[in-house]
Image (cartoon, grey):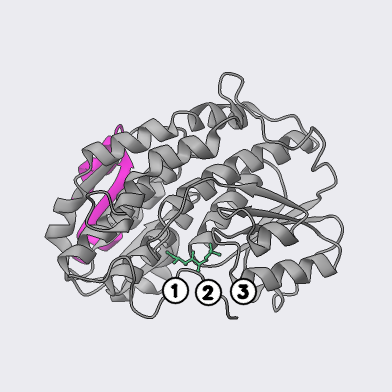
Amino acid sequence: RKEGYDHYMLKEIHEQPHALERTLQGRLDAEAGTPTLDFPPGAFADAERVHLVGCGTSNYAAEYGATLLRRWGVEAQALLASEYTGAAPRVDGDTLVVAVTQSGETADTLSALRFAAERGARTLAVTNVVGSTAARECDDAMFIRAGPEIGVAASKTFSSQVASLVLLAATLVRDGEGAPGEEVRDTLRALADLPDQVATVLDGTTARSVAERYAGRESYFFIGRGLAYPVAMEGALKFKEISYEHAEGFPAGELKHGPLALVTEHTPVIAVFAGRHDEKTLNNVQEVQARGAPVIAVAGERADAVRRQADETLAVPDTHPNLAGLLANVQLQLVAYHVSKLLDRAIDKPRNLAKSVTVE
Ligand code: M6R
């Protein structure tokens, strides 16, 4: 039931505060800033490297998790499940392979998992579906507890996947060689506030008026750096998936190495700021504005320099830079939703796509 919402996707976007509360429930000591997942201390002490595999939105959640793990000193890589076997990664008994898959049934992800298991890797599913193939086949499972997601476009499951991976990353750091630093603890303390902050974004958003102003343009570019990069990629995927408009995501610094040739006054650029590397991303904003492109920034409330430079700003509450991308993503979901609604698209069931892709 859509419970008064026009689409399941909008309902699921609005369910995110509760979904995140469930994801975090009992898994976090907010005062100490430590994870309390069901894995005993030392559970991951043997993991020398971590591969996070997934497809589509789940791949971007994996990219977010891998970037955070590397920041925290753990050797980690996000690898597209559909390219995993071909990429010939080093995978053996010292490797922890984390399958990020909301359905737990994506064929590419399952074959990456089986490839890793045959080589002796330890496997862990991060999934929304208890009893799914990934949950059953992996050595361990961590359920993201987002609740059922009907819309083909992943929304609340992305947020719950990323929140789960933040908890998992902190757990891996706990079991690693160095003691978890203040940054890990501060991130986990801030994580406890995330459900309320997502609710604040949902209450105060102006995504709809941004959508009204920019719907129907030639192309849309999404840019970000660091942890804002997978969020920009996810924003572009969501946008193209449900609006059928051309959208691409780029690491902000890559624009000038080719894609800038496409930028004109007809190509809005959506720039994601996460409170780190913001000055560099602002340079990229100026580069596209010099070519006439309007810039819509998604940034923290206190990012005054960003607000001054951008043509529009979608603000999010200030949080730890390691989590800002999660709040920005909610604004991107809403922009994609409202543009698609204005264009009268089949938002819950976009053409050519299925909720779970069971062929390779
Ligand atoms: O069920 P999974 O998380 O394994 O699905 C992976 C992708 O097919 C999925 O995330 C897809 O990209 C979404 N429909 C995007 O919104």
* Magenta span includes 71: no
The Cα atoms of the two marked residues, 2 and 3, are separated by 6 Å
* Residue at screen point 50% across, 32% down: 191
* Residue at screen point 57% across, 44% down: 164
Residue tagged by mark 1? 354
* Magenta span includes 306: yes
Residue tagged by mark 3? 107
Q: Is residue 317 placed above or below 158 in the rendered structure?
A: above
SS class of the residue under badge 1?
loop
Pointers 2 and 1 in contact (CB under 8 A)?
yes
Circle 2: residue type = Val
In the rendering, at what x and y percent does residue 123 appear? 75, 57
Circle 1: residue type = Ala
Residue tagged by mark 2? 357
Give the quarter of the image for residue 95.
bottom right
Mark toward the start of the polypeptide (2 vs 3): 3
For this rendering, which residue is in front, 264 or 139?
Answer: 139
In the rendering, at what x and y percent does residue 74 appear? 71, 46
* Residue at screen point 31% across, 47% down: 298
